[in-house]
Image: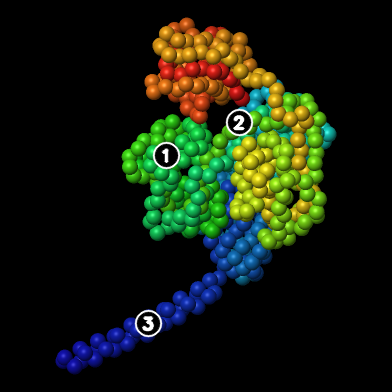
Amino acid sequence: MKHIINYLGALLAVVLIGATFTACAEDDEGSANVGLGIKTFFPTKVVTNQPMTINGSGFSDVTEIEFPGGIKVSNFEIVGNDMIRVDAPAGIPADGGKIVVRTADDEAESRLPLTLGHTVVSGFSKQPGEEASGGELIEVYGTDLEFIKSVELLDAEGEPQIIGHEGFERKGTNKLTFRVPLTNIFKGSFAGTLYTYDGQSISMPELAYKPSAGVPHWETVETILWEGNENLSGGAQPYIGSDAGAEFVKNNVEAGQIVRFYIEPTEEEWWFEVFEGHWSGQYGKWTGETNPEFKVGEQGYVELELTQEMIDAALKQQWWGGIFVIQGKVIVTKVTVIQDVWVEGGGEEGGEDTVTTIWDQETKFGDWSATIAIPADQFANVNAGDIVRVYYKDKGSDYLPLFKHVESWGDWNEFQALKVEEDGYFEAAVPAEAVAELKEKGLRFQGLGFTITKVDLIQHGGGGGGSDSSAIWDVETIFDSWSATIVIPAEKFASAKAGNIVRVTIKDKGSDYNPIYKHVDSWGDWNEFQAGKVDGDGYFEAPIPAEALDELNEKGLRFQGVGFTIVKVELLP
């Protein structure tokens, strides 16, 4: 009996081994020939004429795509066996549905439904009648704003000009930001137009536009807080920045500014989380469902608006940790902060522009090895706010121009953040922090998909100078006891707007330093101002809260404190 059992056991083992080999062979064959199938598509929400891609397998023989509502499309591009490009057709029902691809003898349906979007604009950062200067950012608010494809404004000659979606500063579902062309903008009042993929024309408020004159102004710059190549997919939870927030202190980071995390998903069901740098709370979470525009292997970024509580936590010394802790299924390459920086600029408004050609050798940028370096001597007289304008031709579908540092070949982020596109050229204002390096090293360009014909340096006439028209108090006052005070009269705030900066320049800062924004009549602490107060090198400042405007216009503003001397007070845009 024992021999029979042994024989049956051996026979069963042989059968199982054979079955295993058979199954493996079938799996291998199946992986080599997956067949027709939809793996994913992007975007998952569309409007009519929205370009989209479908990814999967077996697409080489597809003859028809059926969209929700039974709408059949035969006009599409088969990029390869695993990708199709197609524009979303008209007539997709509001509740959406599945996508079906068909060959002559097979069909496959998407796992997830396609939904229909509709752009609704609820407001703008600029109100009718307000001024919009060249280089200034305008924000659009609403829902489904990702379907806005372009903005139409008037150029300097009064002719329509289009700012395409690739020129938007930031583009999201609920907020879109674009920059007014620096110099090629009509001087006068008009209403711009937003255009969507599905044919909507949405009027903007009528604004008073004027070109940049190279005078002192605010510029939006992107400053690197951390840079690396952290793959978090294996469970890594690195600290970003240092304990006590040296990166925030060094770069004068303030509440309301935006921190940007550059990420690259490593899998379809990716996720990314940001925590306080000592694990005291979660600041943000993003996933493949909340941000379907992100694709595996392609870099994008997510943003986090800083609060004063976040900054206070980062600055607290705990002898371990950092500004943030991060984790997820992504690769993180860079963390930056987006800030509005005051550029002193050169020249009084109204002078003549001086245009100097600093490069005139036609250069084709056909691959990434192409580059030009404009020598430092061409920037001997450069000033902050001057314009570097690059004329080009032969713009290709892969068009991508980059401002670069000469020696490191690294992206010059301060320039890139200010780059705007015009018809036949792109340009950027010279950031204040770039002047010294331009004079010492020069400027490099690299990129793809265009040919540079010349580069001009445009300077507003007259050079620096001009009176300090932003000062609203210029009587030097010592605050050596709590009886010291000044009152800035209400008429100084007649043109003030919410978000303008009240900057107080100081000297003789003592160990008992304690400056306070106060109500004029009651002498009470003005808590809304105090909450926004930050200290800089030789000054403190705070943005004007919206709820403070009426009282400023009626009563003015008081300062009290001890341990410093006020030199002047300025009202800045």
Above or below, 294 against 492 in this view is: below
- Give how far across and how far down residue 382 sits, in percent: 71, 38
Tell me which label, 2 or 1, sits earlier in the chain. 1
Quadrant into which the C terminus falls: top right
- Can you tell which mark lies on residue 245? 1
Type of the residue with mark 1: Gly
Above or below, 451 against 216 in this view is: below
User: Alpha carbon of mark 1 to alpha carbon of mark 3: how far?
Assistant: 61 Å
SS for callout 1:
loop
Please identify, in this view, whether the residue under mark 1 or under mark 3 is nearer the observer: 1
Q: Nearer the viewer, residue 41 or 376?
A: 376
Q: What's the residue at 61%, 10% (across, down)?
A: 491
Residue lying farthest to the bottom in this orientation: 3
Number of marks in the image?
A: 3
Q: What's the residue at 73%, 46% (across, down)?
A: 377
Residue 186 seen by the camera: no
